Image (cartoon, rainbow, N blue to C red):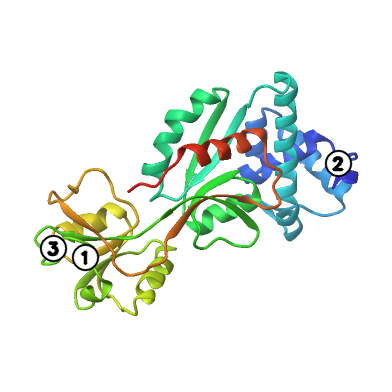
């Protein structure tokens, strides 16, 4: 790509990136505060330099990336980010970390990990802003690979080979029970076999299914799933009201729930696998200075929520 970049201008790359993000030439022109004809000409010139068509022009429907565009766009995005980082480095004479960090986070991790990040990271690097995106594993992986996220806080489950990870810590699953459950009144850890005939409330938030399969499979237990829900608080509230037990990774400080009744947390006696919480980034990405600073901060500060 280096030989091509000497012929393609930075403005052409920046304009093509704006078109991809906006979905239309007009939208890109508005973002860039230039004329639509200037955007269209820059993109056409870039396509001529590269020798491939990046966008399909569709009347009244904007543009769509071609196969070549989908392949080349992450490299364009990376080059633009590197150029921005170079400018920041030059302005700060190598001393400051600047810019906007594009951070992804899996929703069930957000309430535990993002607050300490927002409380601590800006104090160390006040010139860095954080743009947060929450989404599914597939959505975050796609954003990492196409450059719309620089780094993401995720579980290790579901990571693809093109994404590199740094493990922050490992979580060991808990059993949660309503306070009046027969097993809630006993002390000590609970064997999963003791829950074999009990109704279960399951969080249906991929990749949680993989976690449940690993945990129950290690104990040769097949759970009797009565309810499925897509939010962590719904799981806790249904359990608290007696709908069944569940297995969770996080243990919030309060024992009460949205529904009112409290919960009982019990450790699992079986030898079950833990779940790694990781920082993920595309293997092909050239990490910016702010991204490296963020990874170092998380590695030092973030701890298990237990």
Q: CA distance from mark 2 to mark 3?
A: 67 Å
Residue for badge 3: 186
Give the number of the mark in front: 2 or 3.
3
Mark with earlier residue (2, 1): 2
Q: How crowded is the residue under tag 2: few (<14 C-alpha within 10 Å), some, or many (20+)? A: some
**Residue occupying image coordinates x 59% and y 62%:** 160
- Where does label 2 land, which residue? 5
Q: CA distance from mark 2 to mark 1?
A: 58 Å
Q: Which residue corresponds to the image point at 71% horizontal and 35% vertical from the top-left?
A: 36
Lower sequence index among marks 1 and 3: 3
Image: 92 above or below 169? above
Q: Is 250 left or right of 176, judged from the image as shown?
A: right
- Could you tell me residue 92's position as x and y percent? 70, 19
Q: Nearer the viewer, mark 2 or mark 1?
A: 1
Q: Which residue is mark 1?
A: 245
Near mark 3 (Cα within 10 A), the count class, few <14, some 14-19 or many ≥20, is few
User: Residue 269, image x and y in percent?
Assistant: 29, 67
Q: Nearer the viewer, residue 57 or 81?
A: 81
Q: Give the residue furthest to the left.
A: 180
The kind of secondary structure element at disc 3 is: loop
* Residue at 75% in and 29% down: 86
Q: Foreground residue, 116 or 67? A: 116
């Amino acid at each position: 790509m280096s030989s091509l970049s000497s012929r393609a201008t930075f403005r052409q790359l920046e304009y093509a990136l704006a078109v991809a993000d906006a979905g239309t030439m007009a939208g890109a022109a508005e973002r860039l505060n230039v004329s639509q004809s200037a955007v269209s000409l820059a993109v056409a010139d870039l396509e001529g330099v590269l020798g491939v068509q990046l966008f399909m022009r569709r009347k009244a429907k904007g543009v769509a990336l071609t196969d070549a565009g989908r392949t080349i766009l992450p490299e364009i995005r990376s080059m633009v980010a590197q150029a921005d980082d170079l400018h920041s480095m030059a302005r700060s004479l190598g001393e400051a970390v600047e810019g906007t960090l594009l951070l992804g986070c899996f929703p069930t991790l957000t309430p535990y990990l993002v607050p300490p990040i927002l409380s601590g990271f800006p104090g160390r690097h006040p010139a860095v802003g954080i743009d947060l995106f929450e989404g599914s594993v597939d959505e975050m992986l796609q954003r990492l690979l196409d450059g719309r996220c620089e780094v993401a806080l995720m579980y290790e489950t579901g990571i693809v080979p093109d994404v590199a990870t740094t493990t922050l810590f490992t979580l060991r699953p808990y059993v949660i029970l309503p306070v009046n459950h027969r097993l809630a009144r006993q002390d000590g850890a609970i064997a999963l076999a003791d829950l074999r005939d009990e109704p279960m409330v399951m969080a249906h938030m991929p990749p949680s299914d993989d976690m449940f399969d690993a945990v129950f499979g290690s104990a040769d237990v097949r759970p009797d799933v009565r309810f499925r829900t897509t939010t962590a608080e719904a799981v806790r509230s249904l359990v608290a009201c007696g709908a069944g037990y569940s297995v969770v990774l996080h243990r919030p400080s309060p024992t009460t729930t949205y529904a009112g009744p409290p919960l009982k947390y019990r450790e699992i006696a079986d030898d079950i696998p833990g779940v790694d919480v990781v920082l993920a980034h595309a293997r092909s990405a050239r990490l910016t200075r702010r991204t490296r600073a963020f990874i170092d901060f998380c590695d030092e500060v973030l701890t298990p929520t237990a």
